[in-house]
Amino acid sequence: MKFLIKLKEYIKDRFSSIDNENLTRSFLKSLPFWLAAFISGGVAVLYANLFSLAEKGTRLIYEWYSWSFFIITPLCFVLAWWLADKYSPFARGSGIPQVTAAINLTNSRSSKRVNSLLSIRVILVKVLSSLVMVFGGGVIGREGPTIQISASIFKKVNDFLPDWYPKISKRNMIVTGAAAGLAAAFNTPLGGIVFAIEELTKTHFNLFKSALLTGVIIAGLTALSFLGPYLYLGYPNLKGITVGIIIMIIPLALITGAAGSGMGKAILYLFKRKQALKTKSKKLLFLILSGLVIAALAIFLDERMFGSGKEIMITSLFTDNKELPWYMPILRLFGPVISFSTGASGGIFAPTLSAGASIGAVCANWFKMTSVETNLMILCGMTGCLTGVTRSPFTSSIIVLEMTDSHNVIFYIMLTAVLANLIASSVSKKSFYDYLKDHYIDEIIKSEEDTNGQSDEGAKAHKEL
């Protein structure tokens, strides 16, 4: 606090000669966004490295003794669920629905609602639970969790501001934090901005455009300073694509859009069935069986069942080994359904992208397409599947374009997103994230009502005594 007071006095003295109170106020209002963005970028890099180490550990143990995962996977599934269930229930799952719920609740009178969704506790549990989950072979990603982590950091910085500090919208801080998290996770600054506008809020862009842009830029630059210039995936060869390939792109878009939306519905169905289990013994049995199923599929069919699936995307796009078995799309769609429904922490962005990539690769192999055409099919498959889950076609398009620097095929990517969104809307009216957002809001309100009810009963009993 003393630092902020001295900083305020210094700024006033520095700009007193030009008598520019507006400039001073603008600087003070921008400073929390810059600080939070810098912290978020650093935390995103640390989390990414830990997540990568956990996946490498999984592969190393698998090479030594694959059968051990009949013990490791169920054990990790139970531990990851227990961490979230005991210490921070709203740290489970992806994190994006929690952020959108928090944005919706920022106008409510109770700050405890937002604190339940975004906090330091959520960050710690999110990281630990997801690392345990992916180490055990869970089919999860880190991108969604990074968004909730970053939004929590921005919200916490806002909470620490003293009373005399210029008022900053908590809603704008959370939105900017989420966008900065996505930008740092994927190294996709435009994707972060479009994600904030399309997925997170309907607030007019002019109300927070400066804060959003600077937050995304600083978080991205912080990540780049640690990791160096990189693309999330790389530069696939897309030279010589002819317009005729659109004949294959259109059905692929419809297939992947339906697959993504269907996967979301399956997750929600299984998630609700697990929530309906009353006793802990039944929940533990569900978790153990889920772990055994994932382990069995990896051991008996394909070890690429494990993890986020990023290696599948890289191998398919940047090597000559583009052939995938026909069952790989089924595994990559089935894996997130099982893993996500456990109630542990973990994202769905990367698994969804890998599922779409495998669908695109398998379809290209069936029709004996060239290496370059296969690359485009993989990118379009990723876009279509992600759109089916998120129901955000522009965000999905921009993310895929930026993570591969494939702007020369932007027409095919965006066409895929639009068609996938149309077919996904026919499968389910609301997106996967919208259903979960409503679920978390209802859960918070119900917990408040239960607490208030207990307090009222306690007060009544005390009065009778």
Image (tube, grey):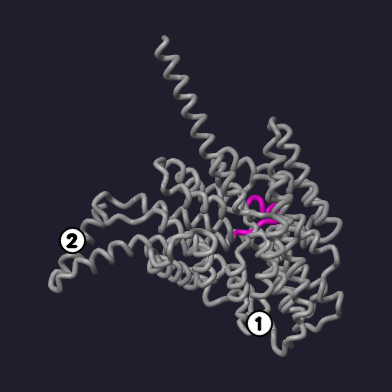
Tell me the kind of residue under disc 1: Val
Which residue lies under the disc numbered 1? 409
Q: Is residue 56 visible?
A: no
Q: Indicate the secondary structure of the residue bearing disc 2.
A: helix
- At a point 71% along the width and 68% down the height, the residue shown is 311
Most foreground residue, 293 or 53: 293
For residue 249, side relative to residue 80 (left or right): right
Task: Find the magenta span and give its range.
Answer: 131-142
Tell me the kind of residue under disc 2: Glu
Q: Which mark is residue 9?
A: 2
For residue 412, side relative to residue 147 (left or right): right
Q: Earlier in the sequence, mark 2 or mark 1?
A: 2
Is label 2 in contact with label 1 (beta carbons under 8 Å)?
A: no
Report if residue 329 lies within the magenta region.
no
Q: Which mark is residue 79?
A: none
Report if residue 136 lies within the magenta region.
yes
Q: Is residue 367 visible?
A: yes
